[in-house]
Image (cartoon, helix red, strand yellow):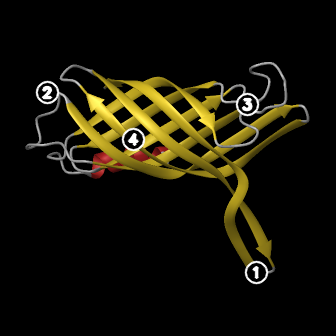
Amino acid sequence: VLIMAAVVPLALPTAARADGYIGPGLGVTFGNTSARGLSDVVLEACWLYQQPIGLEVDTTFAPGFFNNQAAYGSNSVTAIMGNVVVAARENGPPLPRGLHRGGTTRPYISGGLGSIHESTNAPARSKTDLGADLGVGILATTASQIGVRADLRYFRDLVGSSDGNTTSIDFGSFHFWRASVTVLFRL
């Protein structure tokens, strides 16, 4: 995913200017019987073109995810996802690099693959699975270098199984939703 994120922007024509964003945020996880609904930390990096396609890396760290009465931070879920973003287009022709239009608001849908790491101390368990996510949201930017992103995203682990010569990947049993708000800084 990281190699694709580095190579794809180089292969695009120069007229398709893109904006890079990086941003910290806060979220809350829910929709799983084990989820405590405590706040979690979100870090996003996005490369979004004026055309509707972009790439992002979405990281979630939920330090008190599991409802097992342990101290905050002693049991956690960490999800790192590489996603493709399809967003509404910006209006107008592309601008030269470094020049930005006034504020824009772009709804988007995002989805991809990555890893989901679960760690608990009661019972002691730590495992990392392949995961998938799908989200919707809105990205609002100003003419300056700052923006805000609101996002609702669903995460699910993927498990593999093999039977003789056949190998398949299917949805696992671990899943959760995350709602988040991120402050974005334009690169």
Earlier residue among tags 4 and 1:
4
Query: Where residue 59 sits in the image (x, y, percent)?
Result: 55, 34
Earlier residue among tags 2 and 3:
3
Gap in angstroms between the C-alphas marked 2 and 4:
20 Å
- What residue sits 56% from the left and 47% below the top? 154
Looking at the image, residue 70 sits to the left or right of residue 155; the answer is right
The residue identified by callout 4 is 137
Q: Name above or below for residue 60 compared with residue 132.
A: above
Which quadrant of the figure has residue 158?
Answer: bottom right
- What residue sits 31% from the left and 43% below the top? 107
Badge 3 marks a residue whose secondary structure is strand
Mark 2 or mark 4, whichever is nearer to me: 4
Q: Residues within 10 Å of mark 2 (few under 14, many from 20)?
A: few
Q: Amino acid at mark 1?
A: Asn
The residue identified by callout 1 is 165
Badge 4 marks a residue whose secondary structure is strand
Q: Amino acid at mark 4?
A: Gly
Gap in angstroms between the C-alphas marked 2 and 3:
40 Å
The residue identified by callout 2 is 102
- What residue sits 72% from the left and 26% below the top? 64
Gap in angstroms between the C-alphas marked 4 and 1:
41 Å
The residue identified by callout 3 is 76
Q: Residues within 10 Å of mark 4 (few under 14, many from 20)?
A: some
